[in-house]
Amino acid sequence: MSLVNWLSSLPLAPAGWAAPTTAAGRRAARRRAAEDGDAAEALYRPGGAAEITRSHVERFLIHFATEPTPRRPQGRSDSYVNQTFRALQQRFAWLFDDDEIDASPMERMTPPKIGTRLVPVLELDQLAALVATCKGRDFVDRRDAAIIRTFADSGGRRSEVARLALADVDLTRKRLVVTGKGDRQRTIAIGNQTALAINRYLRVRAQHRWASLPALWLSARSSAPLTPDGLYQMIVRRGELAGIKIHPHMFRHTLAHEWLDNGGGEQTLADQMGWSSTQMAARYGAIGRANRAAREHERLGLGDRI
């Protein structure tokens, strides 16, 4: 767990030091730190779960939100930090119920707010450029073209697409059976071009050394099937060839945007994407509303009348 790793990096407490356990004690500690010219009170490594304080959790969440990672050089998203907050809340509640701690350090803490952001989407010419990087007829090009079209056409999550098996593909009905969050299976639709790309891939796959494996997406060099991380790396590599900065989840954003912008329903989109409610559909719909407003603005030409 990230919190445990972060706590382990803290220095050991000096002899005789005791963590403040009340709000008044924490305020006094902050005042002493300010008087000493420090930006925040000193934090030390707790000896166990019972010694983790609210200050530990607050400082960790700040670190977690702002720490750059290879995939998130600007820090983690508001929604990711919010999910981490709630996971920690549940963990401390479990420790309290199990009599491991006398009180949760997160008692009365409020979750960080999730700001409204327009999710990035791909233009159709960018999708075409990605597919164009896979024009060859060899195994890798046929496989990558099928994967890119599956992502773009189905809206499947990276883990869902990566874990597809041969038995999950029905090209006659143009359907895929994916396993989503909570081990829930659902059937998602694909179009003619995606079914054709998968069919072309299956023909070259039949000649592969490890064709007997049940996994749909095979590696070019090893007996192990492609993993979710393998798909991620392939998409990034194809994006670089096409001159596009991309990650797999952008296909999901794009399908949702195109679905709603072309008159598709929020509930049917939620069914396709594996959402338990239409809340996420409404979030993605904000992009379509902004685009429709821009087109209406162009049609009216109000500023051009001046």
Image (cartoon, rainbow, N blue to C red):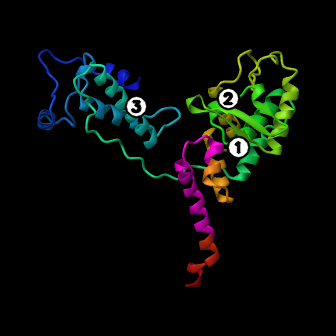
**Would you name the residue on which mark 1 appears?**
152
In screen coordinates, is 186 left or right of 52? Answer: right
Instruction: Choose between 277 and 87: the one closer to the eye.
Output: 277
The N terminus is located in which quarter? Answer: top left
Residue 224 % position (x, y): 71, 17
Q: Which residue is mark 3?
A: 87
Q: CA distance from mark 2 to mark 3?
A: 26 Å
**Residue type, label 2:** Ala
Read off the residue under disc 2.
Answer: 162
| Nearer to the camera, 62 or 237 | 62
Using the rendered view, name the quadrant where residue 232 is placed: top right
Q: Dot 2 surroundings within 10 Å: few (below 14), some, or many (20 or more)?
A: many
Q: Residue furthest bottom?
A: 306
Magenta stretch, main secondary structure class: helix
| Disc on res. 54 | none
x and y percentages locating residue 187 in the rendered image = 70, 37
- Tell me, yes or no, if residue 77 can be seen here: no
- What's the magenta region? 270-295
- The picture places residue 249, in percent across and down from the top left corner, at 61, 40
Q: Which mark is in front, 2 or 3?
A: 3
Q: Does dot 2 land on a helix, a strand or a loop?
A: helix
For the residue carrying disc 1, how many other residues have a C-alpha within 10 Å: few (<14), some (14-19), or many (20+)?
Answer: many
Q: Looking at the image, is mark 2 or mark 3 earlier in the sequence?
A: 3
Quadrant where the C terminus is found in the figure: bottom right
Q: Amino acid at mark 1?
A: Ala
